[in-house]
Amino acid sequence: MNGPASVTLFCGSRLGADPRFRQAAHDLGLGLARSARRLVYGGGRAGLMGVAADAALAAGGQVLGIIPEFLMRAELAHTGLSELVVTRTMHERKARLYVESQAFVGLPGGIGTMDELIEAITWRHLRQHEKPVLICDIAGSAAPFLAAIEAAIAHGFTGGEVRDMFEVLPSVPAVLARLDRLPPMTDGDAIAHL
């Protein structure tokens, strides 16, 4: 296998309004399993998160879910995963999501997905990790997120170099192909501080 062995997916806990979002989550989960990459995600059974996990599991893939206790108590956890880690807080969940993989992929999602992507980009910008951050722009869904970054640049709150902290790809096949072209990551590329 070329590229990272483990990939953290950020995506919606709802399916979204466009059926292409669901198809993308399914195809990504399937593609990660077929390429023998472990899927790491937020541990939920609902929405795009559940679709991606189910597709990976059905194809024989390894799936690590990481979920905080309060969501576990709300019975939102996926119970059929290869491994499920329960954290005390959302902050611990996010830290573990960042540590457990060697690349990040963002699919469509809500404010939680945007938060996770921004933090992964920010930490890379601050040189806390060198892991690739790939944003899959399904049906133009990434446009508002990218516009917010461009607005921060235009208003002088960050430099244009932040654009180099992530890549935008137009489809799941493009994301999977990009993962294949990435070099394998080592422990030295891990997040420096939590």
Image (tube, rainbow, N blue to C red):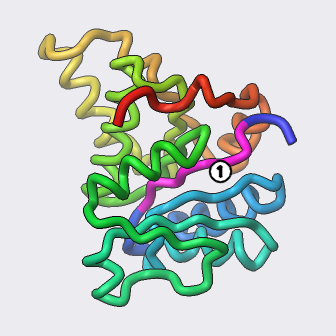
Q: Residue at x 53, y 42 (%)?
A: 104
Say left or right for 83 vs 12.
right
**Left or right side of 51 for 162:** left
Where is residue 75 drawn, in percent x and y? Answer: 36, 89
Instruction: Kindly indicate the quadrant of the structure image that contains residue 89.
Output: bottom left
Q: Which residue is mark 1?
A: 172
Q: Position of residue 38 (x, y in %)?
A: 69, 56
**In front: 147, or 76?**
76
Along the viewing direction, whichever of 146 and 139 lies nearer the viewer: 146
Which SS class for mark 1? helix
Q: Main secondary structure of the magenta part?
A: strand
Q: Is residue 8 magenta?
A: yes
Residue 79 colored in magenta in the image? no
Characterize the local packing of mark 1: few (<14), some (14-19) or many (20 or more) Cα atoms within 10 angstroms. Answer: many
Against 107, residue 69 (above or below) is: below
Quadrant in which the C terminus appears: top left
Residue occupying image coordinates x 29% and y 87%: 74
Q: Quadrant of residue 110?
A: bottom left
Q: What amino acid type is highlighted by mark number 1? A: Val
Rendered location of residue 187, percent (x, y): 63, 30
| Region in magenta | 4-11
